[in-house]
Amino acid sequence: MFSKFTFTASLASAAALLAGIQGVQCKATSDLARANFWFAFGDSYTTRGFSPSGTVPAPGNPLGNPAYPGKTTTGGTNYIDVLTTELNSSLVLTYDYAVGGATINSTIVAPGHASRSFVTQTNDFLQGAGKKPKSAPWTSENTLFSIWIGINDVGNSYQRSGDRNAFNNVLMDAYFKQVHILAGARNFLFSNVPPVERAPSNRGKSDALRTLEHNTIIDYNNKLADRVAAFQKQYSGVKTWIWHSNGEFETILNNYKTYGFTSITTWGGAGDFWGNNYHPSSKAHTLLAKNIAKVMKGTRWFT
Ligand SMILES: *[C@@H]1O[C@H](CO)[C@@H](O)[C@H](O)[C@H]1NC(C)=O
Ligand SMILES: *[C@@H]1O[C@H](CO)[C@@H](O)[C@H](O)[C@H]1NC(C)=O
């Protein structure tokens, strides 16, 4: 039986609960207003299975869908997860448009399997968060655009006939065509292509093939650095960073024991650098994230 006292008390607690909910909503709105944003583009090294039409990033759920850490290539957190939630210097809301297998433009180099290229990822952005809906009040100043693409472009094409270094110019033209249409962007993090010729899946290939892939990647990376410098020069309001993933991978692979790994030839084990035969483990991703944070130290996004 309810006494009058209990009834009044529960009314009071209902009111307190309601005020609490409003308080939370109010806080979420003000958190959103002071959030910084990160729009990431790339391939399997970056993807966490985000769907642009699903739950969007918001305070308390900074990467949106799928649930943290997402569907990363080797399970567990990837560098995007770690940077967004652990190495962040502010509330960073991250839209990760990357899709496994992606190339820059799928007409130029077909992806390994049905995938969304950098071209389609850019369109996903432009048609969604790019329009600055209420859920994504980003500005040119508070937003970072990152691009880590090229692994599959080189990987799926280096065995073709013809001048591979000349082909890298074709790739760069397509790459920067997309960069130019990221309307409103001012802050860009470019990541170069890691030495995937050292991935376990490539170990069975001949030295000649691995050397060819290596050299094609180095040329791609040199051209990327030149293009970034030219892009930076062309637009005085633009700020660019380059993360030399290639050098970082080489350093870790050459000194893997120093970095706490037990093997760079096997994969999937606790001490392995590689999470599977082509992708770094979650443990390796944390190191990569720390390295990126170092490159971008003191910015509004990362510590
Ligand atoms: C870093 O991100 C997490 C997750 O969104 C957030 O809870 C935390 O407050 C952020 N750190 C800073 C310093 O803002
Ligand atoms: C992709 O590449 C093809 C072949 O070069 C070109 O015709 C097409 O315009 C490119 N797409 C975009 C969006 O640039």
Image: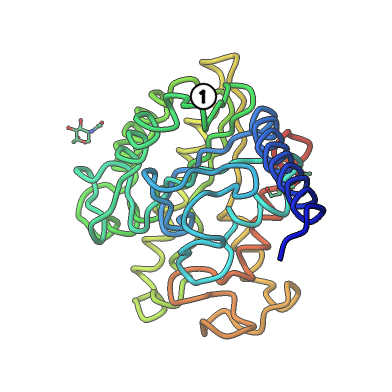
Task: Classify mark 1 as within 8 Å of ligand 2 or not, answering yes or no.
Answer: no
Residue at position x 46%, y 27% in the image: 133
**Which residue position is annotated with label 1?**
185
Q: Nearer the viewer, residue 94 or 116?
A: 94
| Image height of 58 relative to 157, above or below | above
Residue at position x 38%, y 60% in the image: 213
Q: Is residue 250 left or right of residue 51?
A: right
Q: Position of residue 267 (x, y in %)?
A: 51, 82
Which quarter of the figure has residue 36? top right
| Numbered label tally | 1
Which quarter of the figure has residue 207? bottom left
Q: Nearer the viewer, residue 51 or 289?
A: 51
Q: Position of residue 46 (x, y in %)?
A: 49, 54
Under mark 1, the amino acid is Ala
Q: Secondary structure at mark 1?
A: loop
| Visual colour scheme | rainbow
Label 1 Cα crowd, 10 Å radius (few <14 / some 14-19 / many 20+): many
Residue at position x 35%, y 41% in the image: 121
| Image height of 131 relative to 270, above or below | above
Q: Position of residue 263 (x, y in %)?
A: 60, 83
Q: Is residue 55 left or right of residue 116?
A: right
Q: Nearer the viewer, residue 78 or 131?
A: 131
| Image height of 103 relative to 233, above or below | below
In the picture, which quadrant includes the N terminus? bottom right
In the picture, which quadrant includes the C terminus? top right
Q: Position of residue 75 (x, y in %)?
A: 51, 71
| Image height of 19 relative to 263, above or below | above
